Each structure stands twice: as C-alpha cells, then as structure tokens.
C-alpha cells in the first residue's frame, strides 16, 4: 500500500515536472513538421495547389544570363513553332540540331499501338540487328501495330564509312533517326527529347510509347497484353516504369549521376522512372516536350522527364508488379522472363539466345 502511494505521488510529481518540457517539445516538433512539409512538398503540392512561389521556376528555368553558357540546350522545330505561337517561353538563343537521318512516314497508314524509342549509338549495328529480330520486331504480335525507332546522335570522330553504313541500314529498315548532336551520356536528354519530338510531330495519336535502351531485354508481348491491353481504351496521362520516388540529387562529383547544386538546387527529385525503360500514353509526348521548353535541361534524362511530369501535375504510377521493370539484370529463367517487362545489360548474342529460349518455352509456365 505504502509502496503504491509512494509511486502514485511520485508519478504525479513527475507528470507536473514533465508537463512543461512536453509542451515545449510538442511545439518544436509541430513547427519542425510544418517547416519540413513546406520545404519538401515545395516540389509537389505548393506548386499546384497553393500559390506558386516566385523562386520555384527559377530552379528549373534557363536563366537568361546563364543559358548562353549552357551549350546543350535544345530547341526542336516543334518547340520553335510553339514558341512562335506564344505558347511557351524558352529564350530563343538555343541550338537547333540538324537531322542527319530521319523517318517521317511511319505512322501515315495507321496509328500504332506502341512506339518503341530505343536510345542507341551509331556503332551499335549488332545491338540494333538483335533487337530487330527479337523484342523490337514490328510485326511480332498479330493485330498489334508496333513502331520501332532507334535514336542516334553523332559520333565524336567523323567516320564516313560508318555514316554510309547507317544510311544503307536506314534505307533497309526505316527505323533510324539521327540528329547532329554529340552522342554522349550527358546528351541523353537531347536524345529523349528527339524521340518525344518525333512522336509529337509524326505520330501524335499512338496509344503508347516506350523509351528504352539498346542493351535491354524487353518482353514486348507481356508489356502489350498484360500491362497496356490493346482491347481497352488507351489511358490518358499514364506514365509507368521502375518508379524512383524520394531520390536525392547525388552530390558526389565522382559519380556518374552527379548533379551540381547549380544545375539542380532542390533537395529531392520529383518521382521519376528509371531511364532503362518507361512507358507512357502517346499524347504525353507533346505535353512533356512543350513543358520541357520551360525547364533547364538536366543531363539525367529520366530525372529531367520526372521534373517535366511534376510540372504537368502528372504522377508516374508504379507498374502492377514491382518486378515488372528492372534496371539490373534479372537472372534468366523462362518462367520469370515470361512475367516481366524489362531486364538490363544484355549483349546482342545473349539477347537473341534468351529471346529464342523464351519463345520456345513460355507456354510451359503458369
Ligand atoms: C546573372 O547571374 C548572376 C550570377 O549568376 C546573378 O547575380 C544575376 O542576378 C543574374 N542576372 C539576371 C538578369 O538574371
Ligand atoms: C528564334 O530563332 C529562330 C531560328 O533561329 C528565328 O527564325 C526566329 O526569328 C527567332 N525568334 C525570335 C523572336 O528571335
Ligand atoms: C551535346 O551535343 C552538343 C552538340 O553536338 C555538343 O556541343 C555538346 O558538347 C554535347 N554535350 C555533352 C555534355 O556531351
């Protein structure tokens, strides 16, 4: 009994003592949370739902006195026309890259269900050949119109023999677009914009577009029939892939993904999908392209597209299964590859082998 009393009074005393610190702590926590939500969400809800702060666009816009030094800014013909129509506002001192090879008539007969935009390099003849025979085969799925396009830049060293081979290859397959910018990792954003431009200009009514790379395995059949579903009306404002949410800019100068605070001062990237493979509604190409003219070009193309989507107020969605899109190499097994969209780091010969094996054995699963 005594013990109990002692404890009860002790507790009372402690409670009284604790009251003030608890109130202070609570107050501080609340203030902190409010502050954090204001700063973190700067990239999402403030921009859309509340007044857009003056400095919000400053993060993304090419500033007039900086854009002169940013050599790799981009103005496509499409954007130029939009600009002249007064729809968008990138300063008009940006470069325009000439087409070396282009295709303009691939969508004239009918609207494709899926356009495959494949970032490749001029010398990767073997990879292109492997993709043409495997997941990039335009007539692989009966009744589903697929368009395949390789997006190329220019090699650093002028190589006439290679250029001539490319022209011949293009005349045979009609699946190459090449633009006159240096084909480097840091220019990949230009390549993506080139692809978006092509879709917006020549194929705006395609149901879906996939942007991917030349060293990828893509299970086109699974993508088309399980994810996109040609028998259903195409989704609008749809964007999916390997979803990267809450990623912070890499500030380590040694890293491949380094992002300088000057280029991207923000603390966190908006949600984006890994550039190894993302899929979106065809009508988004023009929307992304148009808004991109107001956004400072970032060399990380997937992050850049994520910022464009954020400014459009469109959130990329996760695929039905987390394991659908992979930006690493998934160990091959026909029953696993039968149920995924992408796997990374394939040599052309491996791609052909795995594809053949999958086609022969996919029916054994389930
Ligand atoms: C130009 O840039 C400098 C420093 O980068 C900045 O202080 C200045 O305000 C900028 N001028 C304009 C007109 O934006
Ligand atoms: C913008 O650039 C294009 C192409 O260089 C040019 O034809 C056009 O007149 C320019 N517009 C303005 C407003 O300077
Ligand atoms: C991008 O391409 C342009 C045009 O060829 C070139 O001047 C620039 O150096 C390239 N940028 C990078 C980062 O490679």
Image (cartoon, rainbow, N blue to C red):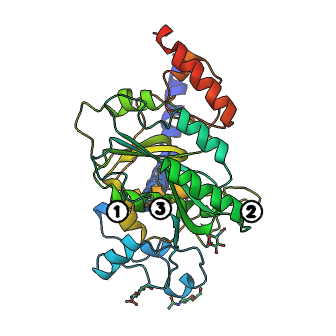
Marks 2/3: CA–CA distance: 36 Å
- Earlier-in-chain disc, 3 versus 1: 3
234 left or right of 322 in image: left
The residue closer to the viewer here, 169 or 86, is 169
Q: Secondary structure at mark 2?
A: loop
The quarter of the picture where the C terminus appears is top left
The residue closer to the viewer here, 124 or 265, is 124
Marks 2/1: CA–CA distance: 37 Å
For label 1, count other residues whose C-alpha is less than 10 Å away and answer few (under 14), some (14-19) or many (20+). some
Q: Circle 3 sits on which residue?
A: 102
The label on residue 135 is none
Is residue 74 positioned above or below 146 on the image?
below
For label 3, count other residues whose C-alpha is less than 10 Å away and answer few (under 14), some (14-19) or many (20+). some
The label on residue 201 is 1
Question: Residue 261's x, y, as percent?
Answer: 62, 69
Q: Secondary structure at mark 3?
A: loop
Look at discs 2 and 1 and give the one toward the viewer.
Answer: 1
Q: Circle 2 sits on which residue?
A: 253
**Mark 3: is the Cβ under 8 angstroms from ligand 3?**
no
């Amino acid at each position: 009994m005594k013990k109990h009393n002692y404890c009860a009074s002790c507790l009372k005393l402690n409670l009284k003592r604790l009251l003030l610190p608890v109130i202070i702590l609570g107050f501080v926590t609340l203030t902190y949370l409010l502050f954090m939500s204001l700063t973190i969400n700067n990239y999402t809800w403030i921009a859309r739902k509340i007044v857009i702060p003056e400095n919000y666009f400053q993060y993304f816009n090419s500033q007039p006195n900086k854009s002169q030094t940013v050599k790799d800014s981009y103005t496509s013909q499409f954007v130029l026309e939009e600009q002249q129509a007064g729809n968008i506002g990138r300063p008009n001192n940006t470069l325009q890259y000439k087409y070396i090879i282009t295709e303009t008539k691939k969508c004239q007969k009918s609207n494709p269900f899926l356009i495959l935009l494949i970032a490749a390099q001029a010398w990767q003849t073997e990879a292109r050949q492997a993709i043409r025979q495997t997941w990039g085969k335009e007539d692989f799925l009966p009744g589903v119109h697929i368009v395949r396009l390789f997006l190329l830049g220019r090699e650093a060293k002028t190589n006439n023999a290679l250029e001539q081979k490319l022209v011949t290859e293009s005349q045979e397959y009609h699946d190459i677009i090449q633009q006159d910018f240096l084909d480097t990792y840091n220019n990949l954003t230009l390549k993506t914009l080139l692809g978006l431009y092509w879709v917006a200009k020549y194929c705006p009514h395609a149901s879906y577009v996939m942007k991917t790379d030349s060293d990828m395995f893509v299970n086109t059949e699974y993508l088309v029939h399980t994810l996109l579903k040609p028998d259903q009306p195409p989704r609008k404002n749809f964007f999916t892939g390997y979803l990267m949410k809450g990623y912070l800019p890499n500030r380590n100068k040694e890293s491949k993904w380094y992002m300088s605070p000057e280029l991207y001062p923000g603390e966190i990237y908006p949600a984006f999908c890994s550039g190894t493979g993302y899929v979106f509604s065809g009508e988004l190409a023009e929307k992304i392209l148009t808004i991109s003219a107001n956004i400072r070009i970032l060399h990380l193309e997937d992050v850049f597209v994520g910022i464009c989507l954020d400014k459009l107020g469109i959130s990329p969605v996760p695929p039905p299964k987390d394991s659908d899109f992979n930006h690493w190499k998934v160990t091959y097994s026909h029953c696993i590859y039968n149920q995924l969209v992408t796997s990374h780091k394939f040599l052309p010969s491996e791609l052909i082998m795995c594809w053949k094996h999958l086609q022969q054995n996919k029916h054994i699963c389930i």
